[in-house]
Each structure stands twice: as structure tokens, then as C-alpha cells.
Image (cartoon, rainbow, N blue to C red):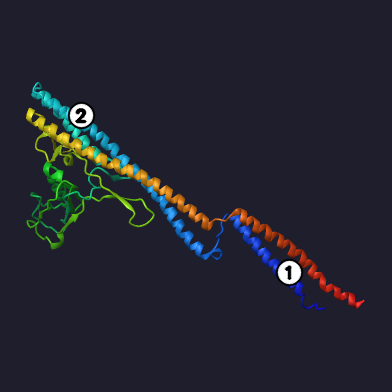
């Protein structure tokens, strides 16, 4: 008999440790509901399930993106619904003005409403936004023709002479701020120029840029009449894109997007107004201020009013086509959302089979481990009593 090494106790202790570890693992899985709680549980399964989790979360976010896209489309389409109503009223007025039972005064009153309704179409086009993004002014149309060009020139180095911008001559003033104001006033005071160009300025710098979708003309400025002009006094920037299509990310991965373009739905683009104005009786604004920048359709005679009917009908058709495109895209996104939900559900089920624990099976394992741990603990107590038998030999 040996007492320095109790082999039975050591063996029982090892079995007890294994049973406790198994019980601990089972309790961890049962408490978390996961079969894989760390990489050591299943290294390959962990890698696969993490990729699936990325796809699932991407699909769920893509579904939210599609829903946001529908909200954007509904905003644009709702605004065009009102544009349709306005155009129908304008067509009605044009038909009314075509009748020679009306006097010139009658047609003048009809013209006033035509002008105001045209300005309202501009207001809708300029102010309809979703999340601060303009929708109906051509910014969401990559096929918009023309480009924005800007020119900036610095007066700080000049000591005298004349500044000529867009054909407008302004004498240099010792107060540079006065010169800047004079140039701005010369351009904004011209109805044709103000319809095409935006003018901003500081104490000694002027920046002029073509308005989106209204002109692709090159800007010109002649500072040769002023002394002390340096080569870097003028900075010109050309070729800035007017519009860019909307891209809805409707998939979990790269290159899984849907593109939508929304055309310019303002009066000029619809053909019911022209840029610039020389007739106050046909004055149209951008809808956000009282500055006249465009010319409305003329309904002052039978012939012009009859032409206006055809023109307005064409505008109605254009708005109808745009609304149809938006509606079709919205229906497509509805199906996209359904597909994304189904894909996410199926992928979640696949991820669950890899990652989640079978509770019933694991409860069996935990019960087994618990019983073995208790039995090992009892056997360890008895194994520790075995060396005491040596004492019987000492009697």
C-alpha cells in the first residue's frame, strides 16, 4: 500500500474536472442560447456565421433604404400631382382664352392667372425637397444638358479704370465695395442676365455662375480697362455637372443598387415658359420671390391661345410620363422590400442552424455532466479515505 500518491484520488479528480468543464460549457450554451460562444467552440462555423450575419444586417438595412426610397418617390410624385392640377387649369384657361367672345381685357385677366400658375409650377419645382435635397429642379437628372460655369475676379489689385462683365461696364471706384455692388446691380438689374446668372460678392471679390439648367454660355469678363491687373485676378471654372441620378442601395453588397432619374419639372423645362422677359404682362418668377425672370405662354389672341393649348397638353403628357416612371419605380421597390425580407429570413434560419444551440440536446448533456460531476465528487471523497487503511497495520 502506498500513501505518497493516491492514484485513485488523482484519477477521480481528473474525471471531476472534466465533468465540471462539460457542465460549465453546457450552462454557457444554455444561458446564451448559442452553440458557438467563442471561436474554440467551432472555428469554421464561427467564420461562416459571421459572414451570414453581415449579409443579414445588410439585407435588413437595404430594406430600410428601399422604404426611404419609396418615401422620396412619394414626395416627388405628390408634388407632381399638384403640378398636374395646375396644368389642367392652365389648359382650361387657354381653351377659354381661345374663344373670341372674350375681349382684350378678359384675356388680360386670364393671362394674369396663367402667369401666376406658371410661377407656382416653378415654386413647386424649386422647393420640393426630401431630406434637404431638391427633387424636381433637374439636380437628380444626369442627362440634363448644359454645364455650370463660374468666374471669379479680384478687384483688390486694381488702382483705376473700368470693369466690364457680361457686357456691362462699371467704372472703378476708390471704395472697392462700391465697385462690387455696382457690378452686382448691373447684372441683377438686367432681366435677361439675372435669369441666367447668379451673382455673389464680398468687399473686393465677385463670383458669377450660370444657373443650373438655364444656360451653358461661357462667362466673359474684361478687366483690361483697369490698371494693375494681374494674371491671377480672374479665375474661371467650367464643366461642373448639372445633375446626378439617385442611387438607392437595395442590396447587402457593392453594385446592388437601383438608379432613378427625376427630370426638371419647372416651367421652362416643361415648355410653358421661356428664359428672360421683355414683356411685363407675361412675367413669370421662380416662385420664391417677386423677381420676373421668365416669360409665360401668351393667350392674348385666338391663335396664341390655341397654340398654348397644345403646348400645355404636351407639358401635361411630360408630367404624366414622369409620374408613371416614379410610380413604376415605387412598385418595383415594393417587390424589392418583399424579396429582401424573404432573403433575410431564410439567411437568418441558415445562420441559426449554425450558431444556435439545440436546447433539448444541450439539456441532456448538462444533466449528464451534472450527474457525473456529483458522482466524481462522491468518489473523490471515498478515494481520499483509502490511504487511512494503512493505519490498521499499526495496531
Q: Mark 1 packing: few (<14 Cα in 10 Å), some, or many (20+)? A: many
Residue positioned 26% across, 42% down in the render: 325
Q: Image quadrant for the N terminus? A: bottom right
Q: Residue 259 in the image: x percent, y percent?
A: 29, 50
Q: Residue 343 in the image: x percent, y percent?
A: 42, 51
Q: Quadrant of residue 323?
A: top left
Q: Residue 81 in the image: x percent, y percent?
A: 27, 35
Residue that carries the numbered disc 2 in the rendered image: 89
Outermost residue on the right side: it is 395
Residue 80 visible: yes
Question: Looking at the image, which is closer to me, 345 or 313?
Answer: 345
Q: Is residue 87 left or right of residue 70?
A: left
Question: Could you tell me how far apart the alpha carbons at marks 1 and 2 are, in whole angstroms?
Answer: 96 Å
Residue positioned 65% across, 63% down in the render: 22
Is residue 305 placed above or below 10 in the rendered structure?
A: above
Residue positioned 71% across, 60% down in the render: 371
Q: Quadrant of residue 272?
A: top left
Is residue 315 placed above or below 247 in the rendered structure?
A: above
Q: Image quadrant for the C terminus? A: bottom right
* Element under disc 2: helix
Q: How many marks?
A: 2
Question: Looking at the image, which is closer to me, 335 or 146?
Answer: 335
User: Depth-wise, is mark 1 or mark 2 nearer the camera?
Assistant: 1
Q: Is residue 67 left or right of residue 272?
A: right
Residue positioned 73% across, 72% down in the render: 10
Residue that carries the numbered disc 1 in the rendered image: 12
Q: Earlier in the sequence, mark 1 or mark 2?
A: 1
Question: Looking at the image, which is closer to me, 278 or 302?
Answer: 302
C-beta proximity under 8 Å, tags 1 and 2: no
Amino acid at each position: 500500500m502506498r500513501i505518497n500518491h493516491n492514484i485513485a484520488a488523482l484519477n477521480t479528480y481528473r474525471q471531476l474536472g472534466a465533468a465540471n468543464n462539460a457542465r460549465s460549457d453546457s450552462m454557457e450554451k444554455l444561458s446564451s442560447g448559442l452553440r458557438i460562444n467563442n471561436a474554440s467552440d467551432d472555428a469554421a462555423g464561427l467564420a461562416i456565421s459571421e459572414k451570414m450575419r453581415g449579409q443579414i444586417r445588410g439585407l435588413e438595412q437595404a430594406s430600410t433604404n428601399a422604404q426611404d426610397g419609396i418615401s422620396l418617390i412619394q414626395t416627388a410624385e405628390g408634388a407632381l400631382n399638384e403640378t398636374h392640377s395646375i396644368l389642367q387649369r392652365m389648359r382650361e384657361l387657354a381653351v377659354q382664352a381661345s374663344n373670341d367672345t372674350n375681349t382684350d381685357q378678359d384675356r388680360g385677366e386670364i393671362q394674369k392667372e396663367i402667369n401666376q400658375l406658371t410661377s407656382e409650377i416653378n415654386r413647386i419645382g424649386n422647393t420640393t425637397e426630401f431630406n434637404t435635397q431638391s427633387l424636381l429642379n433637374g439636380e437628380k437628372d444626369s442627362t440634363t444638358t448644359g454645364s455650370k460655369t463660374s468666374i471669379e475676379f479680384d478687384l483688390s489689385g486694381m488702382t483705376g479704370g473700368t470693369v466690364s462683365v457680361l457686357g456691362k461696364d462699371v467704372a472703378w471706384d476708390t471704395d472697392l465695395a462700391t465697385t462690387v455692388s455696382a457690378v452686382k446691380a448691373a447684372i441683377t438689374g438686367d432681366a435677361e442676365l439675372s435669369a441666367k446668372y447668379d451673382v455673389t460678392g464680398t468687399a473686393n471679390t465677385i463670383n458669377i455662375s450660370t444657373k443650373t439648367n438655364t444656360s451653358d454660355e461661357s462667362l466673359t469678363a474684361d478687366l483690361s480697362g483697369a490698371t494693375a491687373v494681374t494674371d491671377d485676378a480672374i479665375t474661371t471654372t467650367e464643366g461642373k455637372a448639372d445633375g446626378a441620378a439617385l442611387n438607392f442601395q437595395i442590396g447587402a453588397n457593392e453594385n446592388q443598387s437601383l438608379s432613378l432619374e427625376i427630370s426638371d419639372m419647372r416651367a421652362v423645362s416643361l415648355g410653358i415658359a421661356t428664359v428672360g422677359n421683355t414683356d411685363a404682362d407675361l412675367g413669370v418668377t421662380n416662385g420664391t420671390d417677386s423677381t420676373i425672370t421668365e416669360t409665360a405662354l401668351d393667350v392674348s389672341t385666338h391663335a396664341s391661345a390655341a397654340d398654348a393649348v397644345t403646348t400645355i397638353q404636351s407639358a401635361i403628357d411630360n408630367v404624366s410620363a414622369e409620374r408613371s416612371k416614379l410610380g413604376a419605380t415605387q412598385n418595383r421597390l415594393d417587390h424589392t422590400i418583399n424579396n429582401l425580407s424573404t432573403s433575410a429570413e431564410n439567411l437568418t434560419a441558415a445562420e441559426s442552424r449554425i450558431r444556435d444551440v439545440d436546447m433539448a440536446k444541450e439539456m441532456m448533456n448538462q444533466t449528464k455532466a451534472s450527474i457525473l460531476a456529483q458522482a466524481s465528487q462522491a468518489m473523490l471523497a471515498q478515494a481520499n479515505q483509502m490511504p487511512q487503511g494503512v493505519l490498521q497495520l499499526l495496531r
